[in-house]
Amino acid sequence: SDTILLIKPKEGWQVYSSAQDTEGRCICTVVAPEQNLCSRDAKEGQLRQLLEKVQNMSQSIEVLNLRTQRDFQYIMRMEGQFKELRSKFRQIETNKKTQVNRNFQELKGKMDALQPLIPVLEQYKTDAQLISQFKQEIRNLSMVLTAIQEEIGTYDYEELQQRVLNLESRLRNCMSKLTCGKLMKITGPVTVKTSGTRFGAWMTDPQASPRNNRVWYMDSYTNNKIVKEYKSIADFVSGAESLTYNLPFKWAGTDHVVYNGSLYYNKVQSNIVVCYRFETGRVVTQRALENAGFHNVYPYTWGGYSDIDLMADELGLWAVYATNQNAGNIVISQLNPDTLQVLGTWNTEYSKRNAGESFMICGTLYITNSHLTGAKVYYSYSTKTSSYEYTDIPFHNQYFHMSMLDYNARDRALYGWNNGHQVLFNVTLFHIINTEDDS
């Protein structure tokens, strides 16, 4: 999902990932062959054509064989008629007068019956010659096939397959080094669906396996505790719900997150974070975020009780909020997903009320300057270096009002709720690859 669509590698190759420098130039592209590309190897095609030719010739020889067997039976019948003729000649010789005429007519008839034997014998000779030619050609082909086999015989199929698997494994290893990077560009959005009120949240689980694409849908920012589940994006688009969960407490805002099978959300009119396990339908744990403002004390610019923003990235689970102690500026805390204990806290100098939305990528918080048209990612704060910088990364706020924007590390995409439209943005990250094994 940090793929640059402008890259068009040779046919049969696909772009896996790419990165850009600060001026937007592509500096690193990872490409890999499509699966089973090796099966289209030229030599394999050559071998297949030759084998087909041999099979066709074998069938032709079989047809000829059947025909010569049939002709042989015909000749056997003719042999019987020859013997009969010899007997007739003897009779004519012993009784030359009385039966000459009658026997002569009979003899003429027998001779006429033997007439087709001449072309049959000629065809028999031709067929025999063809069979001989075919046999010679098959011998020649066998030699060619053996030569090709010897040419590529140093790597048998199993060895080639093992080498391909080894290369694929190394490619995946290289790809894993591209997981974290700095945000350079946001493209899109793609509108997935139009539904619900102006405000809400939708998400997938970044910790789920690639085959598990369940979608959760939470409409509105207040006075609701019904979560809808869909088995896939396709089911979500068609509206085919699979399950509905009735939470024990209503939520506040739209900044919830699903992480490793649990829903994390802000309990209404409190600074309490709730961890609800979908599998059991129960609250696993809940904990207050110390000093965190709530109930529209420190919301994002659009309001909607968006005081506490829960999010996940490559490094884990986070809470973004504001406190009086930090003068209403944004505070970032990393949370233990099981206990909700705070693992670390960083104070920024960006006013929570002036922020349109925010999201975490690789331990860096990116803050948008507005929730309206013309919004851009204006500020970022790195928890790794405890430092900030001003940025200028525009994104297309297509429906003019953003009430939810969250990064999904598995999909490498931003999920947005854009004025009653559920949208996805593609992100481009700048990667610096440090590799020990350059082999």
Image (cartoon, rainbow, N blue to C red):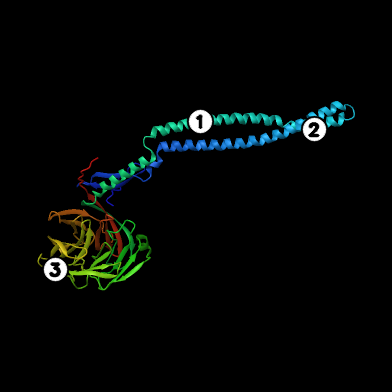
**Residue that numbered label 3 is attached to:** 290
- The crowding category of the residue bearing disc 1, from other C-alpha atoms within 10 Å (few below 14, some 14 to 19, many at least 20), is few
The residue mark sitting in front, 1 or 3, is 1
Occupied quadrant, residue 307: bottom left
Say if 288 sits above or below 350 in the image.
below
- The crowding category of the residue bearing disc 2, from other C-alpha atoms within 10 Å (few below 14, some 14 to 19, many at least 20), is few
Occupied quadrant, residue 254: bottom left
Q: Nearer the viewer, residue 224 or 194?
A: 224
State the mark number for residue 234: none
Q: Amino acid at mark 1?
A: Arg
Q: Is residue 359 visible?
A: no
> Residue 67: x percent and y percent?
63, 36
**Residue that numbered label 1 is attached to:** 139
**Residue visible at 21% across and 48% down in the picture:** 431
| Circle nearer the N terminus (3, 2) | 2
**Residue that numbered label 2 is attached to:** 109
